[in-house]
Every structure is written in C-alpha cells, then in structure tokens.
Image (cartoon, helix red, strand yellow):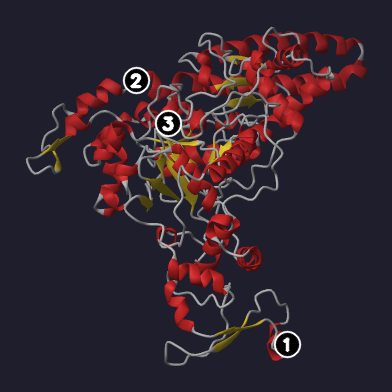
Amino acid sequence: MVETAAYVLEKGRTGTSTWHRLVSEDDKADALLKGANAYRVENIAAFEQIPTTPFVYWMPRSFLDLFASADKFERSDRNVRCGMGTLDDFRFVRNWWEVSEQSGWTPYAKGGDLSPFVTDIPAVVNFRDDGKEVKCFVEAKVGSASRKIQAESFYLRKGLQYGRRIRNPSPAILPAGTIFSDNANGIFIEGDNPNDLFAYLGLLNSDTAKAILTSVAPVRKMEVGYLQKMPIPSVGRENVELIEATRRSAKRSLSVLVSDETSRYFVHPKASLHIEDTTNEKVGDQEFGIPERDVEFLKAQSQVLAADGDDVDGDGDTDNDASEASGFGKLLSWAIGVAFGRFAKETMRKSAPEVDPFEVPPARSFGMGTSKGNKAVILVDDPGHPEDITARVANVLEGVGEEQIDAEELREVIARKFFADHLRMYSKTRRKSPIYWQLATRSASYSVWLYVHAFERDTLLQVQELIAHKLRHEQRELEAALMEANVAPRTSSSVSQKEAFVSELQSMYEEIKRVAPLWNPQLDDGIAINSSILWRLASHRGWQIELKRTWDALCQGDYDWSHLAMHLWPERVVSKCAVDRSIAIAHGLEHIFWFEDENGEWKAYDTPKTPIAQLVLDRTSVSVKAALKSLIEAPDVAAGTKRTRKSKAA
C-alpha cells in the first residue's frame, strides 16, 4: 500500500499549501486534474504539534488546536507501557482451558482486535517463580531479559489495554492479576481506582479519541508513543455521568461473554445480562470539546485509512477463522460438556451473576461443575453402550427442556461435524486447543471421545480394553454374517461392510495398543503436544496434519522443554539441560547443572552434581523405549504402508 504517491517539497516551516486527498478515488489522475478533494493548509508548522509530525492536512482545525493546548496522556499519574514478549508463545503461552486451575499460569492479555470496554482474555502465560524460565530463555536469545520482559512493575495491576492493531482501536479493561503482552499496550492510572479507570475507558473509546489515533499513526500499528503523546482532557471519579455511561457499555460487552463457553465468565449458552437499551449512547466525546461535525468528518476520513490498510502488520491475535457457532452448535457443545462433567446442567436455570471486570478473572467459569470426582473419562459413539455419547447428550438436552431431536440425526452430527466446530470454537490466540478429543476409525464409523481434564495415567489402557471388547463383539457378528451369507448370498454386501468395519476397528486397536505404554499426559505441555502422539487416530484431517507436524517436531528435539520429550527421550533432554539453563529449569534440574556466582551470573558446573548417566537411567524405561520404537516404525495412515525412512529419534 502506498499512501502518498507524489508530493512537492519546499524549504521552510510556514506558508500556505494545497493538498488533494485521493485515497478513495478510483481514477486518481482524473480526480487530480479536476482539483478534487482539495485542502488548503495555512501553516504547516501546525503539524509539528502532532507525534511523528504526520501531514494530516485533512484534520479539522479544532483537532489541531487540541494537540497544541491539551495535556499529553503520559504524565506522572498516567502511564502507557509496552508489556511482555516471550519470543516463543508455543512454549510459554496456553489457552486457559488447556491447563489445570492450580497450575500457576497467569492470565495474559495478548492484544489483537479487542472488543471495546470488556474483552475476553483466553491466554495464560507461564510466569512461575517470577518468570524465571521465560526470563532465562529471553536472556539467552537477546542478551537481556528486560529487552522483552518490559514494564514488569506494572504487571498484575488494574488498568486498561490497547491492542496494537490500528484498524479499530478499542481499549478494554485489563483486570487485576493479568500480565499484558507487547501486543497489548497497558494503560495505568495512579491509585488503580476503578472509577478513574472507567472514566478513561469511556474517554478512549469515544469516536473523538479513535479518530485522533487512527489519523496520526503513520503505520498500522499502535505504538506506545502515539498513546503517550495523545492530547486528552483530565477526567476521573468526579465525572459521574461519563463513568455511568462507560459502565453500561462495559456491561453490554460482558453480556456477550456469559454465553461464550470459552470465556471465564461463561454461565450457559443462553445466558445474558440485564442491560438498559442504550445502544446508540455516545461515550466520552463531549469531554474533548470538539464540534460533532468535526468528529464525524475525521471519523469518516480515518475509516478510509483503516479500510485501505487492514491487517497490514498481521501480528494481532484475532482468530478470523474461528467463526461464531450457531445457536444449536453452542447448545450441543454445552451439552457434550455436561455429559463429560465439565459444565453443570443446573446452571441453565441460573441468571448470570454481576461481576467486577477489574477484578482477577475467575479460575473457572461460572458454568463449570464443582465436583472433581464427577467427570466422565471416556464416552463412545456406540448405540446401546452405557457410555454412549449420543444418548448422554440427548438426555442432557431433554433435561433442560429442549425439543427432542432425532437420535440418528444427532449421532451423525456428533460423529461427523461436531469436532470441526469444536476445533474452531477452541482455537484462540493462534492456538488450536480442543478439550474433547475424537479418536476414530478411518471412516469415523466408530469413535471414542476423551475429555482432557479427566485424563489419568491409565486412560488409554481403558480405551484399549474398550476397543478390544468392541472388536470381539464385531468379530462374532461378522462370523455369524459369513455363515448366513453361505446360506443367503444376497447378504454379501452387508458382509463386506462388516468386514471393512472390523478391519478398521482392528487398526484402531493396534494403534491404541502401541500408544498406551507411552501415555503420560501433562497438561502444562499443552493440547497439541499431549495429543500429537495420537495423530493417526485424529478424525479431522486438518487437525491430524497439525498433530503430525507437532509429533515430527517433538521427535526432532524442537520441544525438549516439554514433559513428553523427557518421558520419551531422556538421554537427549537431560544432556540438553547441561547447555540450556531454561530447559533445565523446565525439568527441575537447574540445581544439578547450574549455579549463580557471587556476581549474580549463572554458570554451568564443570561436573554436574549428579552424573548425566544416572539422571538418564532414572528416567529411562525399557518398555517405553520399545513402545516408542514400535510407534515410530508403524505404518503411516496416509500412505497405508511402512515409511521407508525411519526416524532416528527412538
């Protein structure tokens, strides 16, 4: 995109000039010849009042006067800061539903296109022990942790957040207990008083503030300096009308989240908050004292820029492919969650609670069940089975008064369509992290469903036993069908179908049998790594490709910080702890390999406090290594034959 194609330079800081704004003109040459959209500027020195001195010749005089007279945002009691970058989000960032509630992960505001006033914060970051592991990693990469772990003294404070994308600058609440990233500028007011913050939240969400910011930013990224130098009136807890209007707008935003099951504020799929009908209410504009016609004009001009440069930088964290689920889709997802014990059916009859969006986000959503021992580990797509997922879901829907749905139609939706919708719904912050896993035969004619927060060490052994029982039953059915076919040949097509089904079940059983001895789930590793070992059984092609890519990277040593890597390849990972302190921290071996000298510098021991050979031996299992070799040499499901190039990872 070229914003300025031609210009004339003349020495001097004063004097009049004429400009033609042709951004939205299709035939720019013709428009220029006709003198279209001309703007006369009496004194270009007025642009010097604006950060980065952009030639915003279309800006009304009232806005230029504001830059000249009003205080800039940054001062001793008002601060704008750039936050933390991890340099490896796949390692240090998760979605909150991936990890356990007691895991010590911290809410992490990642920016992107924010919803105004109140936005969801699905991400969490590993900042245990004051960020010891991520600081060590960043320091090794760029020489100093503070180059990316910025403004640490502002972490966990109540404030506001501003995504760096310029398309639609929409500040939102930054709750207490949250770390903000380098893609989500943090805004802080001395004292952290919620009323002061509400006043500035309304002010910065005004059409006036948005028009100013989108006009002066020379690139499509909202850098800290633009906010720090933005002219803005002083407001605070005394601005009662502004605060109340902002609270109403915040409540409207929050009302969307109480029916979104990936939100911490989720209650149930039909939940809403009681809000006043103030949809067209303007917030914060009158405090600037700018004529409304000038605001509307600059707003229109800013929209031209935004439309012309959408997503230029591409560094936001909005998941544009995660389309909004349908009403029934949301209800079905919730019902499956109830069937697994994630959500409580009783919440469907409850009203959404009033919450303070500035307080620490809840560790679990309001709609989640409270009993830890009431989670289903495994459900199956198997009519008549006591753990049949379709029957469980139908029972949930009937229990909350939903119209009865045809059982076969519901079974088809769950077997063939649900996981794709679930994957979209649970893809946030550039992470795909489904919590319900569908392990299926190649045709998806039979599926086993797992819920990640019910995982146990023997879960796959239970799945193996379940499939073995199903396989024996279907083999007996096949034998009976073969005998019948000898008597009545017309049943041969039915026999062929049964033979294909038994063959697929046999393949599924063999794969589970290979993987079960290796199963050692650790939620901290994240959904993708934990499920990568099961990639051959993924029913969704796109997800299978993602898991295969993750598994290959794991085999190659790219994720040796993970618990699964240590479990499968201790000889490789332990050795790496001796040269990479951040990996030693991840595995609790820092004290074995590293020490801090009198100058505060970390150095490796010449000889580890425990021999590497002993550390490896303590973590090596002969049965695990044998099972790993079998898994790596197993046929590739895509090709149906053994791979000719064996991995050396085993």
Give the amino acid at mark 3: Asp
Q: Which residue is mark 1?
A: 30
Q: Above or below — where is 540 with respect to 311?
A: above
Residue named by callout 2: 621
In the image, residue 53 sits, relative to residue 579, either above or below, namely below
**Distance CA(mark 1)–CA(mark 3):** 60 Å
> How many residues crowd around disc 1 within 10 Å: few (fewer than 14), some, or many (20 or more)?
few
> What residue do we see at 60% from left, 25% from top?
436
Q: Nearer the viewer, mark 1 or mark 3?
A: 1
Q: Is residue 238 above or below residue 340?
A: below
Residue 218 visible to the viewer:
no
Quadrant occupied by the C terminus: top left
Q: Residues within 10 Å of mark 2 (few under 14, many from 20)?
A: some
Mark 1 or mark 2: whose residue is earlier in sequence: 1
Give 382 or 499, whichever is nearer the viewer: 382
Which residue is pictured at 89% across the width and 17% down the height? 491
Residue ID for mark 3? 525
Q: Which mark lies nearer to you, 2 or 3?
A: 3
Q: Is residue 137 left or right of residue 2?
A: left
